[in-house]
Amino acid sequence: MSISKYYFITKTNFKNSFAYFYDSLFSAIFIALIVFVFANIWTVVFRANPTGVINGFTLQSMVWYLVVTEAILTSQGRIIIQIGNEMITGEIANYLNKPYNYLFYKYFSTIGSSITTFLITILVGGLTAFIFVGPVQINPIILPLIAISCLLGITLHFTLMSVLGIFALWIEDAHSLAWLYQKVVLVIGGTLAPLDIFPAWLSAICLVLPFSFITYYPAKLFVLFNLNEFIQVTIIQIAWIVGAIIFAQILFKVISKRVSINGG
Amino acid sequence: MAAKNTITHKLISNIKVFWAYLIINLKTILEYKTSSIIQFIAMFFNDIVWISFWWIFFAKFPLINDWTYHDLLILWSIGAMGYGLSGVFLGNRHLIGDIIVQGKLDYYLALPKNVLFHSLITRMPASPFGDLVFGIILAILTLQTTQLPLFLLLAIMATLILSSFGVIIGSLSFFFQNSEKMNTTLWNMAVGLTLYPTNVYEGLAKIVLFVIIPVGFVAGVPTEIIRSPSIEGIATMAFVTLVIGLIAIILFYTGLKRYESGNLLYVNS
């Protein structure tokens, strides 16, 4: 029963997400633009490199890597702002008296639209990459494993954003937190460029932080698949997700006590 | 003579309104100190994260065509100044579409002031101050003292071009329904494109970025002018600023004829 209600929440919101198809499409067009910009930058960089390979990446794999990282990063929408505003404005009251866990409800109500946005972005971003740099060489057999890795990346992304969304009640500004978090994942998480091109000392730090398990590892597995690495990454992704969920639940309980709700 | 007096009178009147809003907006920012400081720091930090990314990138690839990290910093100082100045003084430049769609233009139409100018200046968020301060600091650290007057001139032109883009994008709401998401996407595209090295584009992409949607003039062209100053370069920038500004004004007032009030009652906060 407890799981089936979340199943129905996901199903309902997944259907609803098609009503916002054009919103997802506009987001995807923006990502296509970023892919276009970096396709141009990487083309110039690779032209100056006679081997045609940089840290194991070819021009095609570098640009397709970006398509996957951006698709994961933008799939979840504005969770920090949504949760943060609901905490700050007291709108959270509408959820507290319902027979479900607030954070699980949020996750299952957004995962449907996240998958839709992810797929549209992959399609539009992939088409852009294909036009400007051509196809990437991958084995279709690995795609289900990549899908698992991406889904875990999206889930980890959600859990970290939930923690920050709850935390927004303390500083009373969700927008700034969302802005900063996005930039951290963009750079330290290896969204814009793979961590392999970072200086060794910085790369070593970024590789162990949770942000790299959101975008870097799933995208790298997509273009440079390795089964052992996939298993390791999956285990660590699950560990970070479980850790973040536990932390978010504790934080939510503590912070909920600070929420003041006025009737009316 | 009478016409000249009317123009002068209107100009003085608009300056007075601008000044009054400046004071009110600054007082509002100071009223919400904590939130304003957080927004300021967040935007400043955001800019630092971006130039850190490019530091990493240029450390690995020291030359992108003929651009070095130093050139990228010039690009960012002008881009941040343009974004910051327009955000501080013309804070609604990217929200004109929302104002139209939500029927909030009624408020400005009912008052005897220039509708476009008035609607642009009523908002001053704290975050663009972060860009402004970042741009100034970066320019001081990156440029020689003799380059600063040219930098300031180009930054003002960048501000006007960026704001004009905002008005052009927002004015599309007069012609298309449910255009809020489209406005946001187009604005993000315009801003996003300005802050990447502009010397990597070739062929059709170059024509699009410098002729069809000339976002290259916000920061890319000014960077090239600072690298090798020329009268022709400055004159081109001035011409482009004027043309885009005129397009924005014409499009807004053409669209305004199609505007239908939503009879919305609200408090302009």
Image (cartoon, rainbow, N blue to C red):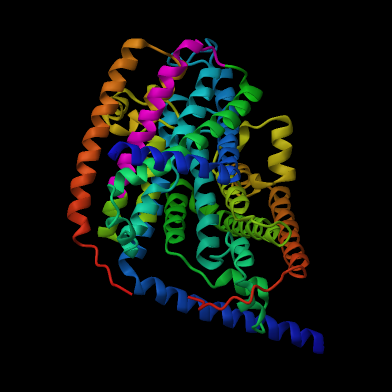
Q: Residue at x 36, y 55 (%)?
A: A174
Horizontal side of B232 relative to A130 (left or right) equals right
Total number of numbered labels?
A: 0
Q: Is residue A102 above or below residue B250?
A: above
Q: Quadrant of residue A201?
A: top left
Q: Does residue A149 show up magenta in the picture? A: yes
Q: Quadrant of residue B251?
A: bottom right
Position of the N terminus of chain B, as image quadrant, is bottom right
Q: A163 and A205: which one is in front?
A: A163
Horizontal side of A108 relative to B189 (left or right) equals left
| Magenta part of the chain | A136-164
Q: A9 and B39: which one is in front?
A: A9
Q: Residue furthest bottom?
A: B2
Q: Residue at x 27, y 31 (%)?
A: A209
By secondary structure, the bulk of the magenta-drawn segment is best described as helix
Q: Is residue B103 visible?
A: yes
Rendered location of residue B248, percent (x, y) = 71, 61
Q: Does residue A153 show up magenta in the picture? A: yes
Q: Is residue B258 above or below residue A16?
A: below
Horizontal side of A202 relative to A81 (left or right) equals left
Rendered location of residue A242, percent (x, y) = 23, 33
Q: Quadrant of residue B163?
A: bottom right
Q: A244 and B2: which one is in front?
A: A244
Horizontal side of A151 relative to A129 (left or right) equals left
Q: Residue at x 18, y 60 (%)?
A: A257
Rendered location of residue B139, percent (x, y) = 47, 51
Q: Is residue B74 visible?
A: no
Rendered location of residue B117, percent (x, y) = 64, 72
